[in-house]
Amino acid sequence: MQTKIFPVSPESLAEAKKIIFDGGVIGMPTETVYGLGGNAFDDSAVKRIFEVKGRPNDNPLIAHVHTDYDLAKIIDYDPPYAKKLREAFLPGPLTLVYPSTGKVSPYVSCGLNTLAVRVPSHKGAQAFLREVDIPIVAPSANISKHVSPTSAAHVYEDFEGKIPLILDGGECEGGIESTVCDVTGDIPVVLRPGLITCEMIAQVVGDCAQYVPDLHSGEKVKSPGLLYKHYSPRCQTALFAAAETAEAVAYCAEQSSLGKKVAILCEDGAKSAFAGYEILNLGSSENEMAARLYSLLREAEKRCDVLVAIEPKKTDGVMIGVLNRLRKACVSVDIPHK
Ligand code: AMP
Ligand code: MG
């Protein structure tokens, strides 16, 4: 199969629509990362997404809809605080998890009794969702565990020959996946951190909890995708805390002496300690670091044998999401899929 990359236009949207209603999947832009989109009502399209990504079948998908889509078509329970969150943050990088009504394919939620719904703000994503006027499931358009894509070229790297079309909407501005927030209980609970932080949510509705899965208690995990090694570049990785500069410098010297090409991923303020090494500069502000993280992880696998990542100093706000991705990308121990 030939994989075409087209900018978003009336012609490419018509082609995308045809592919979707024929049961196919396409690459699509959003403001966070690129997604692999398919018809949420179509069992075989949803199954195809899992297959083509190599995604474990206990890792649920998010249904994406346009701003005027009638949510009552796919959910019924909607607490007043969820409405406030939609008014404050949507369209945008916030996914809300509602009790499921069983309207979309059962494969979307992988047996959970909930459905995650998102309204992306990206203009191209909105145009595509309006064109099809159905919920589109769109997990990040990367082979499972690989780095999430923030450009059409990244999607092409992973899916050339496997999908017919990628809608090119430019580079993603957000850079990390949406905040996933459960709205099935009395207060919102953030399941996956992102650009919309717990504090921002609490400011709007008065309260918000951050879910921390307890990996040792045998508790059934609320959002299974959170656990895995993920987002990983295809090279050796090592991660150091912000205060471990000396250890990181020693590690770089050791790896270089073994003949390996070393690159350093760090915030702008930390780079001076690593003179002589290739620097993949995350920048300075938290939004800049979120936007650059994935493309730098993809650069790393092209440019070096060993990626040495130094955690930025700031650890709150948006950095909770950035550190969550960075740590998973660089862990050496994987938690096996079921
Ligand atoms: P991705 O689209 O690749 O960013 O993955 C979507 C993520 O959303 C999954 O890994 C889950 O963590 C989360 N998710 C999707 N649906 C649900 C749901 N029904 N309940 C909880 N988390 C969900
Ligand atoms: Mg993903």
Image (cartoon, rainbow, N blue to C red):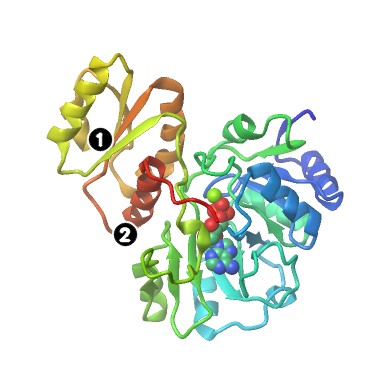
* Residue located farthest toward the left when viewing the structure as drawn: 246
Using a 10 Å C-alpha cutoff, classify the residue at mark 1 as few (fewer than 14 neighbours), some (14 to 19) or many (20 or more). Answer: some
- Asked if 304 appears above or below 32 in the picture, the reply is above
- Asked if 309 appears above or below 206 in the picture, the reply is above
At a point 32% along the width and 18% down the height, the residue shown is 260
Drawn side of residue 95 relative to residue 107, left or right: left
**Quarter that holds the N terminus:** top right
Q: Can residue 91 be seen in this view?
A: no
Q: Which amino acid does label 2 sit on?
A: Gly
Drawn side of residue 225 relative to residue 22, left or right: left
Q: Return the residue nearer the eye: 154 or 142.
A: 142
At a point 69% along the width and 67% down the height, the residue shown is 68
- Asked if 224 appears above or below 261 in the picture, the reply is below
Percent x, y for residue 286? 32, 49
* Residue behind label 1 places its C-beta within 8 angstroms of ligand 2: no
Q: Is residue 319 visible?
A: yes
Percent x, y for residue 189? 43, 73
Residue of label 2: 317
